[in-house]
Image (cartoon, grey):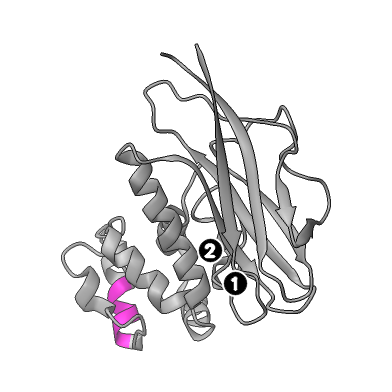
Amino acid sequence: MQKSTTPLLLVVIALCTAANCQVPSSSCDAPLKDGVFNFMKHSSSKSIDEATFEWLKTVTKTEFKRRQSAGFKVIIPVEGVGVPLGYQGDYTDDQIDNFFSLRDQGKMRMFSSQEWEDTLRKTASDAILKTWLDCKRLEAEASRGLGGLKGWPVSDDRQPNGTVEVSLRYFPNEPVPKAPVVEAGGLQVDRGRILGTNPLKKGDTVPFGGVSAVIQRDGNHPVKVWINTTNFCRK
């Protein structure tokens, strides 16, 4: 067994003029569970696109129209005609009737990756979309063996002495993954302080699902967040 210490330096852009943040979470879908997606029943075993698909299978016309008016612009996934049926995300009454007719015929299918991304582009805010895309990119890198300990800023209120949220997650990149063990100091912050309990203290492991922290910045200064971990790897 070999002991190796790997520092992770996460520079959070926390000036009051910069953002690029979202709520830290245990998955890429966590930021989507707020805003226009918060009306759905969320399950830890289902992704947001799966939950949306289940919602579409049972939603009434009245509820569908109400959610569309509230900004929920979903690409309807129907066999053979998913995109032409409503590519722009706004549906006429005739298109909605057509969808319900096709649904009753059992012609719904799961979203393609492009359809789901188009749905998010039409429905989610730019900040949430960027957070989701960044997280999916990290997941894709991990699947190609480019994973490891990752951190990213998630939300920023852009106020002096305001708060910024960060997410830290371990993407396994070895055949038998072992979560990193936190070294002395735990999750550490420069030019800010963690609000509440430090989510990563000495001896804790960085979970595969990820953890989050809310940090209050010092004035308008950028916040630096870092953590030292120890991995036990086979030689």
Q: Residue at x 53, y 81 (%)?
A: 66
Residue placed most toward the observer, 126 or 75: 126
Residue hosting label 2:
32
Q: Secondary structure at mark 1?
A: helix
Q: Residues within 10 Å of mark 1 (few under 14, many from 20)?
A: some
Is 139 displayed left or right of 104 in the figure?
right
Q: Quadrant of the C terminus?
A: top left
Residue hosting label 1:
35
Q: Secondary structure at mark 2?
A: helix
Q: Distance from label 2 to label 1 (Cα)? A: 7 Å
Residue placed most toward the observer, 61 or 109: 109
Q: How many marks?
A: 2
Residue placed most toward the observer, 235 or 120: 235
Q: Position of residue 122 (x, y in %)?
A: 40, 78
Q: Residue at x 27, y 64 (%)?
A: 114
Is 92 displayed left or right of 229 in the figure?
left
Q: Position of residue 226 (x, y in %)?
A: 64, 48
Q: Amino acid at mark 1?
A: Gly
Q: Residue at x 26, y 67 (%)?
A: 102
Q: Badges 2 and 1: C-beta atoms under 8 Å apart?
A: yes
Residue placed most toward the observer, 109 or 7: 7
Is 59 displayed left or right of 222 in the figure?
left
The span picked out in magenta is: 94-99
Q: Amino acid at mark 2?
A: Leu
Q: Position of residue 37 (x, y in %)?
A: 54, 67
